[in-house]
Image (tube, rainbow, N blue to C red):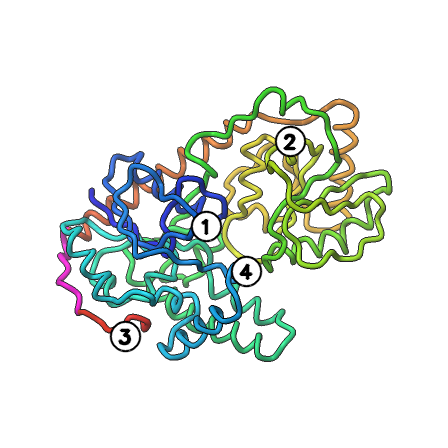
Amino acid sequence: MHLVLVSSLVPVANPASGFDIANRAVLDGLRALGHRVSVIGFLQPGRTPAPDCDMHLLGELEVTNAKVGALQKLKWLSTAFLNRTSVSSGKMLTVSASRVQAILDTLSPFDGLVLNSVQLPAAFAQVFRPYPSIYVAHNVEADSAFENAERARRTFERFLFRREAQYLERYEQQLAQNAVAVWTFSEADRFGFGRAVSDRAFVLPLVTGWDAPVVPAGEQASELTHDLGLIGTWSWRPNRLGLDWFLAEVVPHLPEDLTVAIAGQLDGVPPVAHPGVRFVGRVPDARTFVAQSAVVPLISRGGTGVQLKTLETFELGMPSVATQASLRGIEAAPANCAAAEDPTEFARLLVEKVTRARAGDRQRLDGALFHRAQKVRLMRVMRNVLGGLSAAAVAETPAVAPLLTVHEGGRS
């Protein structure tokens, strides 16, 4: 089959964020099944596109709020209001709908579209709608936006999140309803677009890279420098929610001689009374930092979709204690992972695992086994769904979509 992957940001050579990793997993899975894949989307500045791929770039585009100034954010906001669209889709309107349509025309014939996340597919919905498609839902974006609105402290911020959520809810529903099938990364998200869609929604297991991470023997036997190791981008709201819960609810139940190292970007260090907690900022190598931990707490408390840190921890074979939110999208957690929601029980399990590690039982497993199982399930889901897309392509040959103005391109 010839498939066109439509993504706000194209898959890159060295994926770092959760979005990047999911993009590459989708691309690599499709190619591993023998399909030809062409890609349409923007390239984030400073990144290199995935190698050996038929890329059709719409240009370079920085979409991360934290990496742009106030003026750019104001431009995005005004574009969204003028075009009556979400801010996330408004960012895409640096190109015209006619250009997107022209690229599709040059790629024809193809069997269908793989619409990757909501941003670009919603920005040019009427261009993509006539073609058979699979919608890849990284998260239920509307739910996250509503959640952010509830937690927003300022009235205007609350208004903006609610506005974003309302547009996202409409876009996600339309993309899911128009698709031959929906791929999500967690079981909870499979039902996020309504019962009418759930029977053709399928959970796509993820891996952080197509090849299993190799942990050198020296790293596996490296000296433990801290009992608990946490790493993440804590400036991202769902991550910070989990960190705040851990520090406020779990840490007070830990003994004072237990050490906790917290790595990663953090906006404002929260006050912590526990003497063993250290904020170490950015670290040279995330894998080495994790390998030097006795146990990894997986502390997600909000958001949707699969947790990148959970995948990385399991692929490295590290012992862990996880909340249920951290286990979204994981069909079978490794034997060295314990789950708990109650903060007292969470702390007890951490202490139990740390005590074993201090006694010489590192409790580490072969993470390649988890990685292999995830990849096998990923390809099985893809193979089963693509048969339906092929049948839809035969039954429905799309007419050429009408050319839209930029203003129309922002509607759904």
Q: Give the residue type that dot 4 points to.
A: Ala
Please count the marks in the image.
4
Q: CA distance from mark 1 to mark 4?
A: 16 Å
Q: Are marks 1 and 3 in contact (CB under 8 Å)?
A: no
Q: Are marks 1 and 2 in contact (CB under 8 Å)?
A: no
Report the residue marked by disc 4: 66
Q: Give the residue type that dot 2 points to.
A: Ala
Q: Is residue 127 left or right of residue 204?
A: left
Q: Give the residue type that dot 1 points to.
A: Phe
The first of marks 3 and 2 along the sequence is 2
Q: Is residue 177 left or right of residue 291?
A: left
Q: Residues within 10 Å of mark 3 (few under 14, many from 20)?
A: some
Q: CA distance from mark 3 to mark 2?
A: 51 Å
Q: Position of residue 36 (x, y in %)?
A: 23, 40
Report the residue marked by disc 1: 19
Task: Provide the major secondary structure of the magenta segment.
Answer: loop
Q: Residues within 10 Å of mark 1 (few under 14, many from 20)?
A: some
Residue in the foreground of this view, choosing between 399 and 173:
399
The first of marks 4 and 3 along the sequence is 4
Residue interval drawn in magenta: 394-402
Report the residue marked by disc 3: 408
